[in-house]
Amino acid sequence: MIFNLDSSWNDLSDRINEESGATMIQNDDQFSMDRRTALQNIGLALLSAGIVSSPTELANVFAAEEDPAFKDSRLGALKDLNGYFPFTPADSPEDWEKRAEYVRRQIQVAAGVWPEPENTKIKATVHGKVDRDEYTVEKVFFESSPGLYVTGNLYRPKGKSGPFPMVLSPHGHFAEGRFYDRGAQKVQADIKAGAEKYEVGGRYPLQARCVELARMGCMIFHYDMLGYADGFCLSYDLIHRFAKQRPEMSSEKNWGLFSAQSELRLISALGLQTLNSIRALDWVCSLSEVDQKRIGITGASGGGTQTFILAAIDQRITAAFPAVMVSTAMQGGCTCENATYLRVGTGNIEFAALLAPRPLGMTAADDWTKEIESKGLPELKQHFKMLGVPENVSGKYYPFPHNYNYVSRAMMYEFFNQHFQLGMSSPIVEEDFKPLSREELSVWNKTYPAPPGDEQSEIKILHTLAKNNAEQIKRLTPHDQTSLEEYRRVVGGAIEVMIGRSLPDKEDLEPENLSEESKSGYRQYHTLIKNRRHGEVTPTLFFLPDQWNQKVVIWLDDQGKAGLLKADGSLKTPIQRLVDSGTAVAGIDVLYQGEFNQLQAAPTEMPVVKNPREFAGYTLGYNHPIVSKQVHDILNVLSFSKYHDSQPKSISLAGFGFSGVLAATACAHSSDVVEKLAVDTGGFHFAEITNIRDLRLWPGAVKYGDVEGVLSLCQPASLWLAGNSSSIPELIQATYNAAGQLHQVTLYDDKGNRQAAAVKWLLQ
C-alpha cells in the first residue's frame, strides 16, 4: 500500500527541502522529522505534560487549519436550479448508450418510479361527450394509484379512420390549467405584438392546440397537473406553493409530502406527476384506435418539464415537443419540477438528449431558455448527428415572453405533421373554434363527485403508494441466482444512483504522504488522498506493521481517524491487535469528521441552498446528500488500496455506529473489492429520521430496504453484523442464501466488546 512509497511520495523529501528548507532524512536507523511531524511530536510532548488531552491533533494530516493543500469542493457553495447545466455529447453511440442508461435510471429513481410502475388495467371513466364540427371531446378520469387521480379531456378527430396518432398534452403552469382563459384584454395585446393570430385561439391557447391537432387527424389527451383544474385530490398550494415544513405531518407514522419520511421513500410532487403521466400513457396505449408507433407529447413551462421527463424514461413516446423549458440555465423553479437526485451531474439538455434518435422539437422565449440556439441546441445537433439522425432535432427562439403562443404552436404543428406524416399542407394555420366552457371541460359533477383534497386524503394517498411500492420491492426478494441478479439490477441500480459515484479509477486519485512516524512495530503515515476528478480530499492515517501480511482493514469510526488513537497517541486496543497480527489499518476522516471540522465548524443540520422554501429537492436535486458524500470518501480509500502498487491480497471494511452504516453502504457498491465487512449499526435505521435537515437523511433509503437493504447487496463479502437485531434479517438471509453464501454471515448479539469481537472475526 502507501507504505511502499510510490515515486510521487519518494520525491516528497526533495520537494519539502526546496520549498520550505525543512529536511527529511530516512535510513534504517534514523528518521529526522520534517516540520509537520515535528509539530505533531511537540503535540505528543504537550500531551505527556497534560496540556493536550485529545488525540485529534495527533491524528491530523495537516499541521495547520489554513493549509493550502486542504481544498475540497464539497466545502464550497452548493449548486442550485439557477446554475449552469451544459451538455457534452458522447463520442460514440456505445458511449452514449451507457450514459443514457444511467441518466434514465437516475430520473426514474428520483421520480420514485424505479422499478417501473406495474401496468395494471386502468378503469377509466369516460363521459360527457361534446360534439364539435371536426372533433369530439370527452371527459376522462381514473386512478393512477389509490386516491390519486388523472383527470383530463380526450379529443378525437371526426370523419377519419384510425388508427390515429396520439399526442399527450400536459398543460403547464397556466392559471387554472385546462380551464385557462387569458382574457379579452390580454389577447388583444398579444395579437398586436404578433404573439397570437386569432382572438379565440389566443384567449384559449391550451384548447387551441388540442383542437388544431385533432383537426390534423390526431387524438389528444389533455390532462391536469396536480392541483390544477380537476386535479385537486392534492391541492395547488401543496404541490406548487409548498414553503414551510409541517411538524404535524412529519412524524414516523403521520407524514405527508415534502417531509423527511416522504423523501426517504422518494415520494415527491414531481414523482406523483410523473406517475400520472406514465399511467396516462398506459391508458392511451390501451385504446384500440391509437397508433402505437405515433405517440407524441407536448407541453410548455411546467408542462414542458413533464414532456421531457416522460419522453426521457418511456420509449413508447415516439416524438416530443417541450416548449420554453429546455435550457442550460434555470432548470425549473416549481416544487413539482424538482426532486432529490434528479439533476445531480446532469440537467435538462441531457434529459432532452435522451429522446434521440426519436424526434425532438423545442421553442425558446425571452426567459431562461433564450440562449438555446447558442447553448444547448448546437450540442443536441451534434448528438443527434452522432446517432445518425441530424434531421430529428430542431429548436427556435422567438422573442416573446414565456409562452405557448400561436408562433410556438405553429412550429409544433409542423413538427408533428412532419414526423407523424400527417400529410397536411404547410403552413398549417389555426382556425377559429368554439371554446369549451368550464362545465363542458370539468370531469366532476353530481354523478361523479370530486374526491376530497384535505390532509387526511394526502396521508392516505401517500401511505398507500408507499405500501404498494414496498410490496413491489419485496416481491423482488431473491431465491436463486437469476432472481438475485434482478434484485441487484433494481435495488443495486437504485443504490448506485443514490450514492452517485462508482469506485474511482486509479488515474482519478493523487495520494500525498505528508508525514510519517516510526512506531514500535509499525510505521504511521499521515496521508492525503485527493480525488482530482471531483476536487475532493480524504485525510487518512495508515498504520503499516513492520511485518506486513498484505492485508488491509479500513476502520471507520464516528470520531474519524482520531477514533483509532488513545489520548496519548498510541493505538486503541482493537487497532493494536490488528497491527500486531501484521494487518495494516487505515483510519479516515469522512466529510464533516476530524480535520474537516477543524477547517470550519461542523454543520448541525444539512446545509441548504439559498431558497426560503423548505423543500429538500431544491438542494438535493443538484447536490449529493451528505451520506453519499461521506461514502465517496470511503470509496476513495478503497480504490486507492485496490490499485496500489503493493497489491494487497485482501481489503476489509469495519465500521461502528453510524460509520457502520456508511461502511455497509460503501461495500454495497464495491462488494467485489471488499473481502470482509464488519458492521455494528448501533441499531440505527433511516426510518427513524423525521427532520428534513437531519445530517443523516439519505432519501430513498427506506424505499429500498433501509440498512438491511444496503447490507443485502454486500455479498460476496463475508459479513459480521452487530447492533441490528437478535437474528439475521430475512432480507440479508435471502440474498446471501441466493448467492450460496449464507454461511459467510455471522451475527453477533452478545453484550460484550463488539469491536474486540469484530477484530477476532476479521483475523480468522
Image (spheres, grey):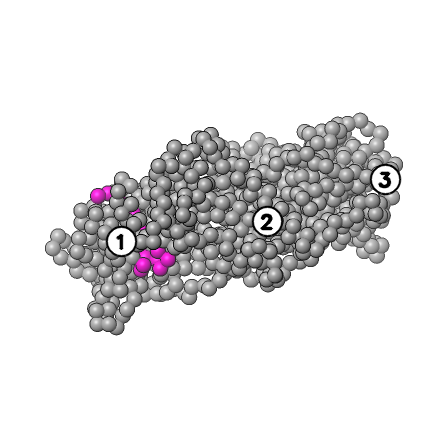
Q: Looking at the image, which residue is at 47% across and 34% down? A: 478
Q: Amino acid at mark 1?
A: Pro
Front label number (1 vs 3): 1
Q: Looking at the image, which residue is at 81% across and 52% down? A: 181
Q: Amino acid at mark 2?
A: Ile
Q: Which residues are magenta?
A: 549-563
Question: Could you tell me residue 482's position as x and y percent?
Answer: 47, 30
Please name whichever residue, 265 or 248, is drawn nearer the observer in this view of the structure: 248
Q: CA distance from mark 1 to mark 3?
A: 78 Å
Q: Looking at the image, which residue is at 24% across and 43% down? A: 550
Q: CA distance from mark 1 to mark 2?
A: 42 Å
Front label number (1 vs 2): 1
Instruction: Of the two numbered discs 1 and 3 on the same chain, state the one appearing first in sequence.
Output: 3
Residue carrying label 3? 130
Number of residues whose C-alpha sits closer than 10 Å to that of mark 2, classed few (under 14), some (14–19) or many (20 or more): many
Q: Amino acid at mark 3?
A: Val
Instruction: Of the two numbered discs 1 and 2 on the same chain, state the one appearing first in sequence.
Output: 2
Residue carrying label 2? 267
Asked whether, in this view, residue 439 is left or right of residue 584, the answer is right
> In terms of secondary structure, where does tag 2 sit?
loop
Instruction: Of the two numbered discs 3 and 2 on the same chain, state the one appearing first in sequence.
Output: 3
Write down the quadrant of residue 525 in the picture: bottom left
Q: Looking at the image, which residue is at 68% across and 37% down? A: 281
